[in-house]
Amino acid sequence: MTLFDEVFERYPDHTAVELSTTSAMTLDRDLLNPVAPLEHMLQTPPAADSLVKLVRELEWTGPPAGIRIVVYQDMDTSLEGQISTEVADAETFMYLIAWLLEWSQLPAFRWTEERIEGHFRADTKPHAHIYHVQFVLQTEPLHEEMIKYALLLQSRRE
């Protein structure tokens, strides 16, 4: 079951879903291949030094932030909470956003704009649903290298 299917099943009258988090990662086309950074790190000699550096960075920054979710019905909030970090966190969220931008066929030079609007059509074959998805991605620089990402998704199902 896709995220869209779950939202439509649990909240059939919803009008929008907002997902937000903070991250030091920036959006670029490299995020379309989530395995590439790990492969690059392991192929860059010495790989052990890269792993030590990664562990130190995680000790300094801590694990990736969680993702806040708000489900709206009209302009009222019908659900507000956190997505379990076992399901998704700020780091995986960035890869998901990159794919939304790709599916919307937005050119990569627009991916760093503070406000991005896009849309695409999604076909969930096993469930035979077609979704028309519109989104707005807002970014807000916070401090140092941290950026707040807020993604508002609206969809309709055929």
Image (cartoon, rainbow, N blue to C red):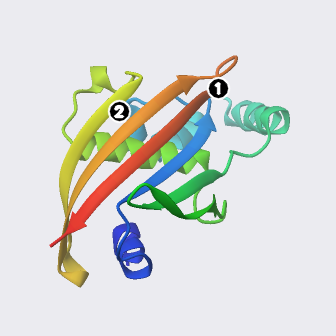
Considering depth in this image, is 139 or 146 the residue closer to the camera?
139
Say which element carries label 2. helix
What distance separates the C-alpha of mark 1 from that of mark 2?
Answer: 19 Å
**Left or right: where does residue 97 sit relative to residue 65?**
left
Q: Position of residue 155 (x, y in %)?
A: 27, 60
What percent of the width, then of the height, locates residue 91? 58, 45
Report which residue position mark 1 lands on: 146
Up the image or down, 82 lies above or below 24; here it is below
For badge 2, the amino acid type reads Arg
Residue 119 in sight from this viewpoint: yes
Q: Nearer the viewer, mark 1 or mark 2?
A: 1
- Height in image: 72 above or below 107? below
Identify the residue shown where x is 39% and y is 37%: 137
Residue at 83% across / 32% down in the picture?
A: 60
Q: Which residue is mark 2?
A: 29
Q: Earlier in the sequence, mark 1 or mark 2?
A: 2
Where is residue 56, by image quadrant?
top right
**Which mark is on residue 23?**
none
